[in-house]
Amino acid sequence: MASAGRAPSIHNTQPWQWRLHDGVLDVRADRTRQLRVADRDGHSLLVSCGAAAQLTELALSAQGWAVETSLLPDPGDPDLLVRLRPVRRTDVDAGAKSRLAAALGRRSERRAFGPDAVSADIVERLRRAVTAPGLYVHFAVSANETLGLAVAISQADRWQRRDSDYMAEMAAWVRADDASPDGVPYSVIPQVPAAEPRHTDIPLRDFEVGVPGGQLITPDVDERPLIAVIFTDVDSELERLRAGQAMMRLMVQAELDGIASCPLSQSVDLLAFRTRLRTLMSWTGHPQMMLRLGQRPAAAAAPLTSRRSVGDVLTIA
Ligand SMILES: Cc1cc2nc3c(=O)[nH]c(=O)nc-3n(C[C@H](O)[C@H](O)[C@H](O)COP(=O)(O)O)c2cc1C
């Protein structure tokens, strides 16, 4: 469970609970940890829990379990998001072990990436990691698309930053102490001096809300991240969970290929933003999640962000 808890979640809220009972392991939504402002429709909660479910399945298969997974198995119990039933022991798959190790070493990288582009063969592997029926990823490459995305993200950012409740909520999830079991610690937040703004095509969510970030960034680097957008053909709770699973697979594949990643969700947090983004970009599918990807920066990595203890997230019936 400690491994599965390393899944990413919005503001590191970890809005999940595992429940082990009757030979099954359930992943349940913990709505008490849902962001009331930035995630008022629960979209990011579902994406986060989808990532946690994917990592749970990976951790079980790395221990030699074949697992049957059902998503939203009980319409009468909407917080029961995923049920995993270990059905038999199998040979331990070396691939699963290395994917799990990659998932445990992964972190959200918010500094500027290295200058080299992500190679075409890596992009192809990332695409394969995501693609499933009704689910796909698009990499924004043209200047027009990048501009459109920058406009959508800046609009979402402006709208959110004007909302004092949004700012107060974000400040409440920023932590001075690295050992805090949830929230985003200063040590992983980039420090951007006002006189030296980032040279970036795509703005990032700015966690520097009255706190000095702990990650010094190299000034004057032109950021050209690869932007990945995960889409579903249909927009539903089920598809949001599946998008979270796909995001986790993409992050793991990126890590295996030595590529750093970070979710960038402002323009998809709320239904109104997703609708505007879809219209602006003339997309037919439903954008569910956005990530920036690129070469790891040369400077030492930020510390891993802490998680809650297993005792806090697992109940055994
Ligand atoms: C649905 C979702 C949305 C997120 N949105 C952002 C974002 O807009 N900006 C950002 O820097 N990180 C974002 N994150 C990353 C989380 O802040 C991060 O996963 C969490 O702090 C734990 O840190 P780690 O991923 O380094 O382990 C998001 C993660 C998820 C799952």
Image (cartoon, helix red, strand yellow):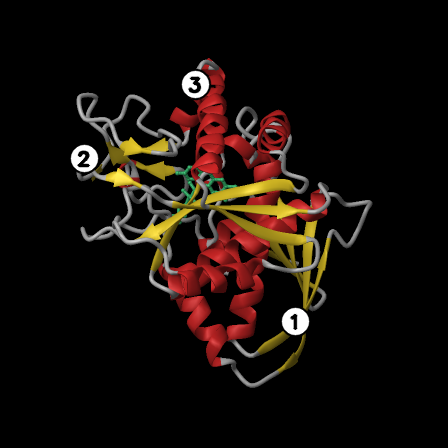
For mark 3, give the secondary structure.
helix
Q: Residue 97 at what x, y percent from top left?
A: 45, 74
The amino acid type, in three-letter code, at marker 3 is Arg
Secondary structure state at the residue bearing disc 2: loop
Select label 1 or label 3 by which is in front. Answer: 3
Q: Which amino acid type is shown beneath numbered disc 2?
A: Asp
Q: Identify the disc placed on residue 161.
A: 3
Residue 67 numbered mark, or none: 1
Residue type for callout 1: Val
- For the point 35% across and 29% down, the residue is 206
Which label belongs to residue 197?
none
Q: In which quarter of the image is residue 279?
A: top right
Q: Nearer the viewer, residue 275 or 251?
A: 275
- Label 2: few (<14), some (14–19) or many (≥20) C-alpha neighbours in 10 Å: few
Alpha carbons under labels 2 and 1: distance apart:
48 Å
Query: Residue 277: where, in percent of width, then height?
Result: 58, 30
Spatial separation of the CA atoms under disc 1 and disc 3:
43 Å
